[in-house]
Image: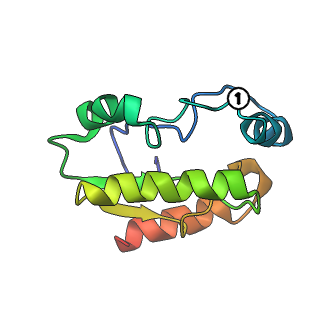
């Protein structure tokens, strides 16, 4: 965000589960441990998401990266749909999710998309 001179960002994670290991996170989500853990997917948390996005008219950075794990891809799609329903401009890396440290091109792709306004 430094490169684009952003002074403020708001982070909404795809999951509230704090797990530094991507492999363990995928296992936890596949085992159903993530029920209700996403502000994007849970109807119970729709009011929370609305409170974070209502009145916001800027761009939303979809900062998920690359993964072949279906559970994470589905999370990314749910988040994308939730943001688009609010008619916000989503910028990111094609709806894919994964840990940025796993891909050397992730940050480069994201910065290029932000700079280009896509």
- Judging from the image, the colouring scheme is rainbow
| Extreme-left residue of the structure | 55
| Residue 96 percent across, percent down from the top left | 61, 62
| Residue 91 percent across, percent down from the top left | 41, 63
Q: Is residue 72 above or below residue 110?
A: above
Residue 58 seen from this side: yes
**Residue carrying label 1:** 33
Binning the other alpha carbons within 10 Å of mark 1 as few (below 14), some (14 to 19) or many (20 upward) gives few
Within the image, what quadrant is residue 69 found in?
bottom right
98 vs 91, left or right, is right
Q: Residue at x 40, y 68 (%)?
A: 115
- The residue nearer to you, when weighing 87 against 33, is 33
Within the image, what quadrant is residue 95 found in?
bottom right
83 vs 99, left or right, is left
Q: Is residue 107 above or below residue 52?
A: below
Q: Disc count in the image?
A: 1
Residue 3 seen from this side: no
- The residue nearer to you, when weighing 73 against 19, is 73
Within the image, what quadrant is residue 94 found in?
bottom right
Looking at the rendered structure, the secondary structure element under dot 1 is loop
| Residue 18 percent across, percent down from the top left | 67, 25
Quarter in which the C terminus is drawn: bottom left
Q: Residue at x 69, y 51 (%)?
A: 71
13 vs 71, left or right, is left
88 vs 34, left or right, is left
| Residue 116 percent across, percent down from the top left | 38, 74
- The residue nearer to you, when weighing 50 against 100, is 50
């Amino acid at each position: 965000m430094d490169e684009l001179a952003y002074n403020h960002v708001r982070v909404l994670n795809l999951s509230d589960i704090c797990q530094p290991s991507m492999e363990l996170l995928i296992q936890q989500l596949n085992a159903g441990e993530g029920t209700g853990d996403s502000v994007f997917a849970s109807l119970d948390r729709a009011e929370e998401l609305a409170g974070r996005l209502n009145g916001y008219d800027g761009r939303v950075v979809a900062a998920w990266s690359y993964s072949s794990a279906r559970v994470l891809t589905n999370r990314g799609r749910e988040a994308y749909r939730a943001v688009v329903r609010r008619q916000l401009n989503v910028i990111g890396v094609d709806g894919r999710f994964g840990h940025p440290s796993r891909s050397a091109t992730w940050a480069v792709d994201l910065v290029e998309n932000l700079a280009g306004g896509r």
